[in-house]
Every structure is written in C-alpha cells, then in structure tokens.
Amino acid sequence: MMTREKILKDLQEKFKSDIIDVFDKSPKRVYIGIRPESLRKVAEYVVGILNARFNIATGLDARRHIEILYHFTLEDINLLVSFRVKLDRTSPKADSLTDILEGANWIEREIHEMLGVDFRGHPDLRKLLLSDDWPEGVCPLKADYKEWDKKAIRDRGI
Amino acid sequence: MKRDKKPARRTIVPIGPYHPLLEEPEFFTLTVEGERVVDIDVRIGYNHRGIEKLSERKTFDQSTFVIERICGICSTSHPFAYTRSVEDVIPVEVPERAKYIRTIIAEGERIHSHLLWAGLAGHFLGYNTVYMWVWKMREEILDVMEILSGNRNNYAMFKPGGVRRDIKPGDIPPVIKKLDTLTPTLEMLNKAIRDDPVLHARTKGIGILTKADAINYCALGPTSRASGVARDVRKDSPYGVYDRIGWNMITAKNGDVFDKIVVRILEVLESIKIMKTCLLTLPKGEIDLNLKSIPPGEGIGHVEAPRGETFHYVKSDGTNRPVRHKVRAPTFMNLPTFKATVVGETISDATIILAAIDPCYCCTERMAVKDRRGRTLYKGEDLVRLSQKKTETLRKGMK
C-alpha cells in the first residue's frame, strides 16, 4: 500500500508543469492548485490509478477568478485532496469530467447555472436547480448578483 | 415536443414533481413500452431554497440552525458535517464528551431513518403488517431521542466547537432499557424478511446496481454498500468516536432491492450496539470549546448520514460569517443511479426501485400516469396498488 508521502510526491513529480501550488493543510486535507487545461489529465490519474472517490466539486466566486474545487477522497490513506482550478471571471470555461466520471454530471450542471461556467464536452447542460425560465446570464452565486434583482423577476413574469 | 418524435406505443409516465422533505424534490419522467421502462429522466429543483446563499448572510452559529432544516429526517447529519467543516477551518478537535454525545445522536438518527424507510418499503410492497410493525419500533427510538435531546426530531444539539446540551446521567438507564427491548424485535424482523419467499420473489434481482456502476456514479451509503463497495466514512475517515468502539461495516454483493433492505436492517442493529457502547462509556468533562472567532481559511467536513456521505465545505474570510458554504446531500449522488437501475424493469417494480435508494416519499405518492391526450390513467395510489397486487399474485402462486 502506498503511503501519503509517496502518493503526494508521485503526484507532484508526474504533474510538475500542471501543479501551481500545494497547500498541505492537515494530515487529512491537502489543497492542490492546478492549471485548468490539465484538469482532465489529473482527474484520469486520480480516479483510474489512485482509485479515489469523487466527492463533489465546489464552485465559488473569488472576486478575481471563478474557482472550482474538485474534492477527491483517497480512502485507503484517509486523505481528502481538493484540486483547485482558477478560471477567467468574464467567460469561465472548463473541461467536463462527465465521460471519466458519471458522478460529475449533475454538479457540472449546477455550477453552470450558479456561476455561468461553460463545461466543454458536457452532454447535457440543462438547468438543474433553477427553473427553466430563469434568465440567461444571471448567476445567483456570483458576487455581483443582486438578490431580488428586479429585472430578473420581471423577465420571469412574476 | 420531444414526445412527438417517439414511436406512438411509447408512453411517458411522469412521477412527481414535488416533495417537500428532502433538499431535492424530484420529478421522474419514465418512458415505458408496454410495462417495461426504456428511459428515465430525473428533474430536480422544484423546491430549491437557496440555503447555500442564505448561509452566507448568517453567522457561523446561526447557520447551524438553518442547516438543520435542510432535511427533516436526517436533521443531524447536516449540522454534524457543517460543524466539522467549521472546526476544520481552525483546525481544532472538540472535547471527548462532546464527541461521544455527537456519535450517540447521529446513530439514533440512523436507526429512526432506516426504520422509517423499511416501513414504507413494506407498504409499497403490500406488506402493511411490516409497515405498522416497524413504525411502532420507530416510536421507541423517537422516545429515546426525546429523552436525550428534548425533541423527537430536529434535535438542535450541535454547535461549532461542541454540543449545546449535555446528557444527564439519570437519562441513560431508561434509554439503555428501551434499546435493549428493540434488539430482539429487530432480529425477528431481520429473520422474517430473509425467510419470506414472496419478498424474495419481489425484490431479488430487481433494480440491480452493479459495483462498476456504483463506483462510476459515485453512489454513497447503503446504496453503494449493497453493491459491494465497502466504503463508509465512519470507517475510512473516522470522526466522533467511531474509531474507538467495535462495530462492523455491513456490505452485500448483489446490489438489488433485497440487498438494500438487508444492509439497512443490519445497520440498525450495529447502530444500536454503537449507541449502547457510547452511553455506557460516556466520559466526564467539558462539552463545548466556546469558540470565539473563526480565522480566514477553508474547511471540509464529511460524515456518514443514513443515506450516505454528507459533504460540507466552508470558506471563511475572518469575519463572523462564511463567504461560501457548499452543501452536498447524499441523494444528490444517489439519484442519478436510476439511469442504471430502472431501465429494463417493469413499471410495477419502478415504485420500489425508486424508493430503494431511500429518497423521501411524497414523490412516489404523487405519481400520475397520463396518456398522450393528458387523460389520467393511474394516480399515485393506483401505482402503489399495482405494486401491491403483484405481490398478492405472487403470494397466491406460491401457495
């Protein structure tokens, strides 16, 4: 069985040019910043070789960027690795992981509607949580979203 | 629109769309050919309450109460995951006694949630005796929770840094007594379910979720453990006191509805064991750290809820409220598995397969089958009756 140190070292050697920073927060939590274009490569390795379980992805508006954190659990060594991807705030685009992991399907739909991230290669980017007549381009989890946006409500005919 | 392109003999069966208990109310569109389901589409979001957004405007302490109201059945797993994620920001460990109390409450919730499900599964299959019987047992555990927390549900026991209410020494003996009476009846139920030929005929080989699908769809909790995926947050990443007391992870290998029933019933027995051990070895000491402020940073908390892993992510900027709070309930990952389990099965089995992952039930009560002109052919009660009729026919055939 591979140890925690070995896995993290392997990861950093294998994806030397893809990893931006590593934050070893505590024995159970590691945050790794990666380049958006390397996302699929890293996910394939983590799921296929390391047998990690995909927990979920968190999308958040960090003011300068749109960030997505992909949380994976390595159950054998009790470690939760979060891969952080920083996307351009004006037109955020990321590669879809749906064909690697069916479990990423719904969360990508959710991040698409909540933060306006375009997932390239996603088979079905319909609305998931918001209603079908929700106006395009109004993203509730963006920092500049105004709650009770009058225009959004008028457009929905309420 | 889409409907017109399909061959005429296909019928759309809408199930839903509204169900007020879970975070995700569901609307299933089953496409059927005769009796067989050929496609399923799941639509959620009818009751989206924006709790993630709401939480950003509450303080860390206030959020605990909002989070508790995400789900009426597993009202402890969300605060548990949330408080652990806030504690992970610092990071800090809660006092021993608080860990024990948290474990006790979480296991009590698992018992009542699994029993609630077992009763309703019995009802859908036409076993109303099981339904009444199991719900009577569930009353006992709700009484236990009332003794321990003051509430039958929504216990409000958790806070970042500890628990809000202590367990009085005088309350422990009556709770142990109640748990002891529950064990033999549950063992009898377990035997009754395993020996019943009609239940075998009705649930074995129905709605199979293969191990590969369970991993690909990232299925969680009893849904994946019934398919042979031995993953449980309580074992893999122990929290509370799960690493200190002996208990077994329950797995099965077939992934059908029968295995999902068996896994849940056996888990209840394990939970009773855990609860009793914790109550008997409850250490003395503080129950709260009295956290004054949360530093900037990120934290993740995940716990094993009755339905699978509940996942919370909190980002703090040093003020008294989170800047981002992500909530992922287990059903979010379990619902898409219907694509793998329902397709190819008959519509009378769909009722129990859709119930087998343990979503909440109002959706199945609101089923309606309509033909292309919009005339109602079956309603929710009719579908339950259809499912019960099938059991009845099987039972007669076996005599």
Image: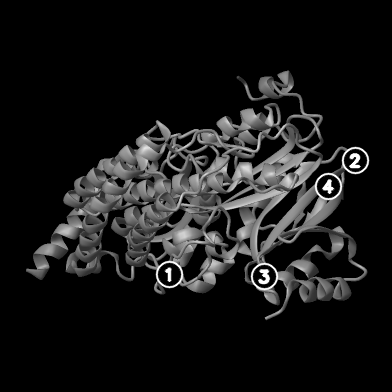
Q: What whole-number distance in Å separates the C-alpha atoms at marks 3 and 1? A: 21 Å
Viewer can see residue B10: no
Amino acid type for the residue under numbered disc 1: Thr
Q: Does the residue at mark 4 contact the one at mark 3 (Cβ under 8 Å)?
A: no
Q: Are marks 3 and 1 in contact (CB under 8 Å)?
A: no
Where disc 4 sits, the SS reads loop
* Labels 4, 2: one chain: yes
Q: Which residue is mark 4?
A: A92
Q: Determine which residue is flagged by label 2.
A: A64
Q: Are marks 4 and 1 in contact (CB under 8 Å)?
A: no
Of the residues shown, which amino acid type is indicated by label 2? Arg
Q: Which residue is mark 3?
A: A77
Do badges 2 and 1 share one subunit?
no
| Alpha-carbon span between mark 4 and mark 3 | 34 Å
Between marks 4 and 3 in the image, the one whose residue lies nearer the viewer: 3
Pointer 1 local density, CA inside 10 Å: few below 14, some 14–19, many at least 20? many
Give the mark, 3 or 2, whose residue is nearer the N terminus. Answer: 2
Residue A45 seen = yes
Residue under label 1: B251
Quadrant holding the C terminus of chain B: bottom left
Q: Earlier in the sequence, mark 4 or mark 3?
A: 3
As drawn, A105 above or below A40: above
- Disc assigned to residue A25: none
